[in-house]
Image: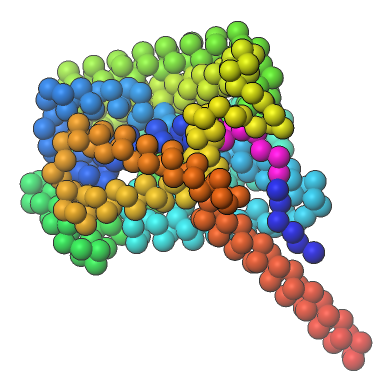
Amino acid sequence: MITSLAPERLQSIDMLRGVALLGILFMNIQSFSMPFETYINPTVYGDFSGVNQLVWIVSHLFADQKFMSVFSMLFGVGVIIFLQNLSQKRLSNRLHFIRMGWLLVFGLVHAYLLWYGDVLFSYALCGLFIYVVRNKATKTLIMLSVIFFTIPSLITFFFQSSLNFMPQVALEELQQSWTPSAELINNERHAYTAGWLEALPIRAEKALFLQTFLFMTNTFWRVSALMILGIILFRKRFFHLEWSANKYFTLAAVSTILGLALTGYGVHYNLSHQFTLAHSMFFGSQFNYWGSAIQATGYAAWVMLACKVMISENRLQRVDNTFTSELSKKLANVGRMAFTNYIMQTLFCTGIFYYLGLFGEASRLVQFSIAITIITVQLFMSDAWLRRYKMGPLEKLWRFLTYKSARSTLANTRCNHISSGNGKAKG
């Protein structure tokens, strides 16, 4: 009989996941509120001077790809914990594939019906791959993580070196994707504010691009590498708060400083070259690409250090592996409901920017203010929900579908065996 699992939770992981989920919104809100290309080329649309430029610089330095990198690490950890609990309960690893299959479905629905910037689709596919390498030796995993993370950079440099050899038509199309015309931007603005059906074609086009070309050239390699890094840290007992405070501090400080230095130089490089395609689309993007992963490791270490210090100073009581301070509990509850909160961010933002007609109207400062408001709401909403229920609604639905599908599969397998046995007996 298949039963649901109730694994022991590491609240340090829940807290870190909550921090990552909330931090992601500072960048995602730019995609919700502005044209597609603005995310990678901030000069494409809107005011990019004064306080708005400052907001972009701060967001880019401290948030862009950093919190998503942390989230990717933790997804790899989540896969390992789930598989370990399957083994302890003597349940089939088939449940993992069913679970990733349903996540894939959620991702497709999210991307095509709500918001093209979905990550669930990519996480589901990378989660299937992680299963293959999960038991490799730690040295092998380190090598795989480095190689996988390097591949998108090699692809990027290949494209940059090919610019001088591209046909003029292809070069013009590439330029158009980097700095779209006013007509294309106005069409996108109109589509997103005209209604759900009108936005469907443009949303589907962008989702398809992200799930095919970008996934094969960047997302699969980067996300898989970060998931593997999460598994390595989990093996090293990083998330279990078993490192010394000095070790956490050293990793946090060095990683954050190095990551900020790389990303900061990238900001200087791109601003000085005015975000031209030849400089910023390829080479200029690599500073944050590498800096964000390093910085994300530092962020994870800061959170682990905070937990460690608060426990040692009795400012954070640890009872049955749970943390009881109010802020830490709220952050952990956001992390426990990460799936629900992720989709809720989409619902909040599409409601504000698409259906209230604010798409393309909100400055970066206003976007930042809206993100802060949503984060505050989610902190209290998650806490209130989990005071009454054991898990978030989408987490419960995901679990229900996983085990229901598993029971159906097992039942069908048994029926097939019985039918096959009867056939042989009759023969």
Viewer-closest of 88 and 293: 88
Viewer-closest of 151 and 108: 108
Quadrant housing the C terminus: bottom right
| Residue 242: percent from left, percent from top | 69, 19
| Residue 398: percent from left, percent from top | 56, 57
Q: In this orientation, does residue 381 appear? A: yes
Q: Is residue 111 left or right of residue 391?
A: left
Where 427 falls versus 136 (above or below)?
below
Per the image, is 68 magenta?
no
Point out the stretch of residues depicted in magenta. Answer: 7-17
Magenta: main secondary structure: helix
Q: Residue at x 16, y 36 (%)?
A: 363
Q: Is residue 407 left or right of residue 149?
A: right
Q: Residue at x 85, y 87 (%)?
A: 423
Q: Residue at x 51, y 19 (%)?
A: 302
| Residue 58: percent from left, percent from top | 28, 23
Q: Quadrant of residue 373?
A: top left
Quadrant housing the N terminus: bottom right
Viewer-closest of 424 and 159: 424
